[in-house]
Image: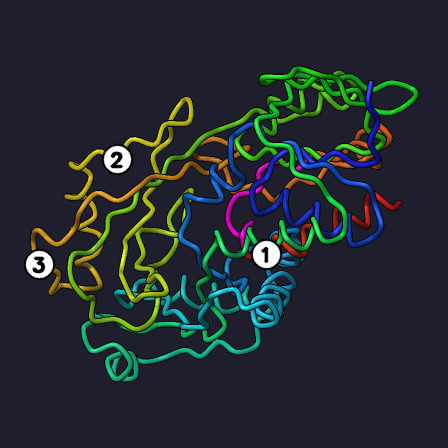
């Protein structure tokens, strides 16, 4: 049986960031990815937004790692030529009745260390985005967008520069904690077993199932996976907005919002639909709900402009009607199994927080 110091399971943006941090700290790292390429899961099916840190409970992992990760991410992209833009966003109160919710977002954001928010009145909003119908809005200048694939490529390159290895087509079937480490059984074309001193479960949607499949006392603490699909519709033509536009958040997500890619193309989404298993189907009929939601703040949206785009699935660890869960990064201090770290519920703002999550996991692994 081969042995390795650290095995990171999952080559999405968070797994790659963990591998990069561990390798940069001098650890021997192999990244185990079941697919034939890195970053093909939830890391490839999101809004590619760099979040400022407005929405998350102060002191939570989501809040701390988002704000820290956002600063790290802008610096990383600038230093390595990863395409990105600090375009800013507006969080919109459509009516006076939503002002209290807008104030609560601003208060929470400032408690999280977001110090550049500005509240805008109707005329100030109209001066920035003439097509936007809003009673008031919060301007977040530090919100941006990033090329997620280029980011992952840079993380992989940096990890490999420090000696990490990527093993594609290597699904982890199960494992077991032993006195000598954690034995992983790997499938694929050449099934094998690998003994790792440290295992990082960064398997995204599959992290809870994998947490139960690695036999140890930690298995009983794995949460139940819940899945919330969000679909996106692309906009045909050039949208008359230069910033991201977000409504007040809704249960399970941030509402149907407008985001831009680095070429200026607009897309809308994601909505929230609870499903039993990951499914990336986009029902064209859902466009009607999108038109209704978008016209609350962009009444001039024309019929026929929305085309089915793609879908993503949020790796939830709570179900509908429950308060959003914090990131769960379970290490030995929680479950008592040396060398085992599980990452559960790493949904948004996981992309923004990835570099900070990587450093956090590497510090836990050193401990």
Vertical position of residue 278 compared to residue 159: above or below: above
Per the image, the residue denoted by label 3 is 302
Q: How many marks?
A: 3
Residue at (66, 25) in percent of width and height: 222
Q: Tell me the element at label 3.
A: loop
Q: Quadrant of residue 215?
A: top right
For the residues carrying marks 2 and 1, which lies nearer the camera in this image? 1
Question: For mark 2, what is the residue?
Answer: 282
Q: Marks 1 and 3, Cα distance to the nearest angstrom?
A: 39 Å
Mark 2 or 1, nearer chain start: 1
Identify the image quadrant of the N terminus.
top right
Residue at 60% over, 58% down: 66
Indicate the position of residue 10 as horizontal and vertical percent values: 61, 35
Give me the residue at 26% from left, 72% from top. Answer: 135
Give the residue displayed 78% in from the left and 48% down from the top: 362
Residue that label 1 marks: 154
User: Is residue 347 in the magenta section?
Assistant: yes
Please report whichever mark, 2 or 3, sits nearer to the chain's N-terminal start.
2
Numbered label attached to residue 322: none
Lateral position of residue 138 relative to residue 57, left or right: left
Q: CA distance from mark 2 to mark 3?
A: 21 Å
Which label lies toward us, 1 or 3? 1
Task: Find the distance from the CA under tag 2 to the CA under tag 1.
Answer: 30 Å
Q: Which residues are magenta?
A: 343-351
Please state which of residues 209 and 136 is positioned toward the viewer in this rendering: 209
Residue 329: where, in percent of width, then height? Answer: 70, 40
Front residue (pair 307, 109): 307
- Mark 2 surroundings within 10 Å by alpha-carbon count, few (fewer than 14), some (14 through 19), many (20 or more): some
Which percent across, then down, holds residue 80? 59, 67
């Amino acid at each position: 049986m081969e042995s390795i110091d650290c095995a990171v399971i999952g080559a999405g943006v968070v797994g790659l960031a963990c591998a990069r941090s561990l390798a940069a700290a001098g650890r021997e790292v192999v990244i185990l990815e079941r697919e034939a390429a890195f970053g093909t899961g939830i890391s490839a099916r999101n809004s590619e937004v760099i979040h400022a840190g407005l929405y998350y409970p102060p002191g939570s992992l989501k809040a701390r790692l988002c704000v820290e990760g956002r600063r790290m991410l802008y610096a990383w992209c600038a230093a390595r030529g990863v395409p990105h833009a600090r375009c800013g966003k507006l969080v919109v109160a459509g009516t006076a009745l939503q002002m209290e919710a807008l104030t609560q977002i601003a208060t929470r954001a400032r408690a999280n260390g977001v110090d550049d928010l500005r509240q805008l009145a109707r005329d100030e909003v109209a001066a920035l985005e003439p097509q936007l119908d809003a009673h008031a809005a919060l301007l977040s200048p530090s919100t941006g967008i990033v090329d997620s694939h280029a980011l992952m490529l840079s993380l992989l390159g940096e990890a490999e520069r420090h000696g990490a290895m990527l093993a594609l087509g290597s699904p982890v079937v199960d494992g077991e904690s032993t006195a000598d480490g954690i034995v992983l059984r790997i499938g694929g074309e050449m099934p094998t077993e690998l003994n790792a001193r440290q295992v990082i479960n960064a398997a995204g949607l599959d992290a809870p199932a994998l947490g139960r499949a690695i036999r140890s006392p930690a298995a009983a603490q794995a949460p139940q996976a819940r899945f919330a699909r969000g679909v996106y519709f692309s906009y045909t033509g050039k949208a008359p907005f230069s910033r991201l536009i977000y409504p007040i958040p809704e249960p399970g997500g941030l509402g149907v919002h407008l985001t831009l890619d680095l070429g200026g193309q607009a897309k809308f989404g994601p909505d929230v639909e609870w499903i039993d298993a990951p499914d990336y189907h986009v029902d064209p009929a859902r466009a009607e709900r999108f038109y209704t939601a978008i016209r609350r703040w962009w009444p001039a949206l024309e019929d026929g402009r929305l085309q089915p785009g793609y879908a993503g699935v949020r790796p939830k660890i709570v179900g509908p009607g429950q308060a959003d869960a914090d990131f769960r990064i379970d290490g030995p201090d929680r479950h008592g199994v040396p060398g085992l770290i599980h990452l559960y519920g790493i949904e948004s703002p996981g992309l923004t927080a990835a570099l900070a999550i990587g450093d956090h996991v590497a510090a836990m692994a050193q401990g």
